[in-house]
Amino acid sequence: MANTFTNSLVKDVGATPIASYVAPASTTSIMIGVNLSNTTASQIKVDVQLNNIYLIKGVPIPANSALSPLDGKIVMKAGQVLNVTSDTASSSDVVVSILEIS
């Protein structure tokens, strides 16, 4: 089994759900960190979902600030999708740190 650390980087997340990470086929992925940054001069609210299940919903992030909402690790099976949405267009950058086991 190969263990690979990787990051998924997504820029300018807005009101349309963006697949920030998709677990590859034949792979178990362990989410070890998530960072959500507010790149605007106003507060935004962000949702993070794993296969349409909310991990966080409507969490406020102050202007020009960031949030690391993951408290512990989350296991993702092959094909599962991590979506991020903001209430404001092009307002959040996302970094997801993952350990992929294949």
Image (cartoon, grey):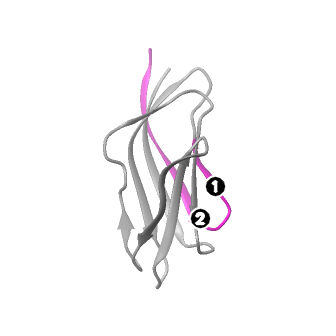
**Image mark for residue 18:** 1
**Image mark for residue 50:** none
Highlighted range, magenta: 1-21
Q: Residue at x 45, y 39 (%)?
A: 6
- Where is residue 59? Give x, y as percent: 44, 65
Q: Quadrant of the N terminus?
A: top left
Locate residue 22: give its quadrant.
top right
* Towards the viewer: 36 or 60: 60
Q: Is residue 23 left or right of residue 37?
A: right
Magenta-colored segment: predominant secondary structure:
strand
Residue type, label 1:
Ile
Q: Residue at x 68, y 62 (%)?
A: 16
Task: Indicate yes or no whether the magenta region holds residue 11.
Answer: yes
Assess whether mark 1 and mark 2 are in contact (beta carbons under 8 angstroms).
yes
Q: What is the secondary structure assignment of the residue under circle 1?
A: strand
Q: Is residue 51 above or below residue 35?
A: above
**What crowding class fits label 1: few (fewer than 14 Cα within 10 Å), some (14-19), or many (20 or more)?**
some
- Where is residue 38? Give x, y as percent: 46, 72
- How far apart are labels 2 and 1 at the CA level? 7 Å
Q: Is residue 58 above or below residue 98?
A: below
Please, which residue is most extreme toward the right here? 16
**What crowding class fits label 2: few (fewer than 14 Cα within 10 Å), some (14-19), or many (20 or more)?**
many
- First reached walking from the N terminus: tag 2 or tag 1: 2
- Where is residue 48? Give x, y as percent: 51, 54
Q: Is residue 66 above or below residue 76?
A: below
Q: Disc 2 marks which residue?
A: 13
